[in-house]
Amino acid sequence: MSGPVLTEEPLQFGAGGRLSGVLTQPDLTSVKVGNPQVFVFLNAGLMHRVGPSRLHVRLARELAPLGFSSLRVDLAGTGDSLRRVGLTNRQSVAADFDEIKDFLDLRLGDVPVILFGLCSGADNAIRLTLGERRIVGLVLLDPYCGSNNRVLEKARAIYFRWVKPLQHIVALKKRLVPQALRDVPIAELPRTVFLTIREAVSNRLEPETLRDVPTRDQLRAAVLEIRERKGRILSVFTQAAFQTYYVQTGQLGRVIKVEGYEAFCTELFWPEATHLYLLEVHRRRIIDEVKAWAVGYSRA
Amino acid sequence: MRSDFAEPVHTMQEAFFLGESKHRVFANYHPAVRGDGRILAIICPPLFFEYMHVHSALRNLAIRLSEGGQNVLRLDYRGTGDSFGDLEEFSVSDWVDDIKLAVQEGRKISGSDGVHVVAVRAGALLACRSMDALDGVRRLVLWDPVADGATYLRELRDVQARCIEQHIYMSRADRVEAAQECAGHRVSNRMIEDFAALDANVYASIPKNKLYVICTREAGGLHLNGHSRVVIPPACDWAAIENRITIHPVMSELLRACLALS
C-alpha cells in the first residue's frame, strides 16, 4: 500500500511465517529526513496489533511523515500470530523479539529500536530492554512502577476506598450497578451505593495479580541501560494507574532513583484518560504527545 | 476438522491490501486446507469497539472453515483495523463497497464459484445491503445482527454515555468534546444519516432460503417472519466496551451453518 508519504506492507515472518505484522515506512521521496530509529508496537494485552481503538495503526501512520518506520506486530499467540507451544510467556516474547530483530536486519539493517507498549506491552518492553543494545527508546503507557512512599500509598488507599466514592457517588452509581440502584428505594440509596462502592473497591485487583510485571530492579536496570545507550523514555500514567498504584506525578523517577532521570525521561500523569484511551479526545492527545516526543528524540 | 475452538498451532494465511484507491482495504486470506475449495467464505466483522471483541473469534472461525474445505477471506472495512483511512471519512456505502470488493477479489484469488457470507452485528446490516449487487452468494449467516440502523445508533450513543461516565477525572472541556463522539470515535454526519436510513427491510429483502440468523439472546435483536433463526445462549454482552469473545457455543453453530451447504 502506498499513500502520499508512506508505504505499508502486511507481513508474515519468523520461522514458518509464525509472526504477523505490518511494516510502515516513510516514502523518502516525500519525507525530508528519514530517522534511523524504528518503532516496534507490542500488543496491549491480548488485543491484536492494531492496538486499542487502532491506536497503533494511527501512530504508525502519523510517525511515517516524520521519517520514522514502524512495525506493529502480533506476538506469538495474539492476533494473527501462532502461539509457541511449550514456552512460558516470557520465553515466547523473547523468541518473538529475536525473530523481529532478524526481520529488521533483513529489511532495514541494524537499526535502533524504540519499543511502544501499553499495559502488558509496557511490561514486555521493559524486560526486552535488558541486555538488548538495539533498544534505545521506550514509550510506556501505564507501566507498573510500584510505590516509593508508604504514607502516601496508605492515604491513597483510604482516599479511594472511602472518600472518593462518596464525592462521586452520583456518577459512580450509574457506572457500577446502574439497573440495581435504580430499583432501590430513595431512603436506602445512600447506604446501598456506599456498600456497593466499598465492595467494588475492595474487590479491585492490583496490577501484580493481573500482569506479569517486571520487578523494580528490572525496571531500574532497563532505565539505566537506556541512559547508557543515550536513549530516551516516555511514560504516561492514566486513571487506571492512579486508582491502583500511581500516587503522584514523578513517581516512576522517585521509585527507581536513577541519576539524571529527568534529562532523558519524560513522565506524564493523565488521570483524565482511561487505560485503553477509549475516547478520541484522549487518543488524539497521546498520538500528538508521542509524535512530539519522537521529533524531540530525533533532534537530540 | 477439530470440533473445538482451541487456538490453532498451524495455519496458512496471507494478508494483503485490496483495491486500487488511496484508501485500500486490508484482508486476510485463508486458503482451503482440504477439499476442492468451491466455496469462498467472506467474514464481515462488526464496527467500533465490537470489532476488538471478536477479532480472535473470527480468525479462529476462518481457520476452522479453511480446515473444513472453504477458502476464507476476512476483511477490515476502510477506517477500521489495518485498512487505510479514519472512521470519520467513511460511511455505509463505502463499507458496502468494501464487501463487494472483497467478494469480487476473493473469487479471483480463490477461483471459488459459490460464496457464503458470515457477518456480525452491524456487519450483518452492511452485508445484506451489499447483496443486491452480488451474484453467487448462496448463504448469509448472521451473528447477533443489529435490528436496524436507528437501534444501532441508539446503542452506540448509550455506549458513549457510559464511556464518559467511566472518565471520572475528565475536565469539562474534554466532556464537551467527548460528547461529539460516537462510541469513542469521531464519525461523519453522513454515516449517522446512512445508518438511520437502514431499516429491517434490508434483511427482509434477502431470500428466506439464503438467510440464517444466529442470536445469543431471545429478546431484542432481529426477528424476521419466515427466516431461519436460532438462539444459542449465553448472551454476548455487545454493550460492554471492554470485552473479548473467544470461545462461545455460537462459534460451533456458525461453523455448522457455513459448512452445511459446502
Image (tube, coloured by chain):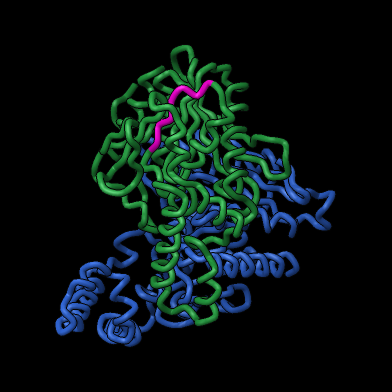
Q: Which percent across, then down, holds residue A250?
A: 50, 80
Q: Residue A176 at x, y = what percent?
A: 28, 70
Q: Quarter of the image containing the C terminus of chain A?
A: bottom right
For the N terminus of chain A, the image quarter is top right
B60 or A88: nearer the eye?
A: B60
Q: Does any portion of residue B210 appear in the rendered image?
A: yes
Image position of B111 (left or right of B6): right
For this view, does B9 lie left or right of residue A54?
Answer: left
Residue occupying image coordinates x 63% and y 77%: A263
Magenta stretch encompasses residue A242: no
Front-most of A6 and B170? B170
Q: Which chain is green?
A: B
Q: Which residues are magenta?
A: B136-142
Between A258 and A187, the one nearer to me in the picture: A187
**Which residue is located at x 62 percent, y 70 percent?**
A289
Spot occupied by residue A184 in the image (x, y as percentages of width and height): 17, 75
Is residue A130 at least partly visible in the picture? no
Residue B139 part of the magenta segment: yes
Q: Judging from the image, what is the letter of the chain drawn in blue?
A: A
Look at 83% across and 52% down and name the residue there. Answer: A30
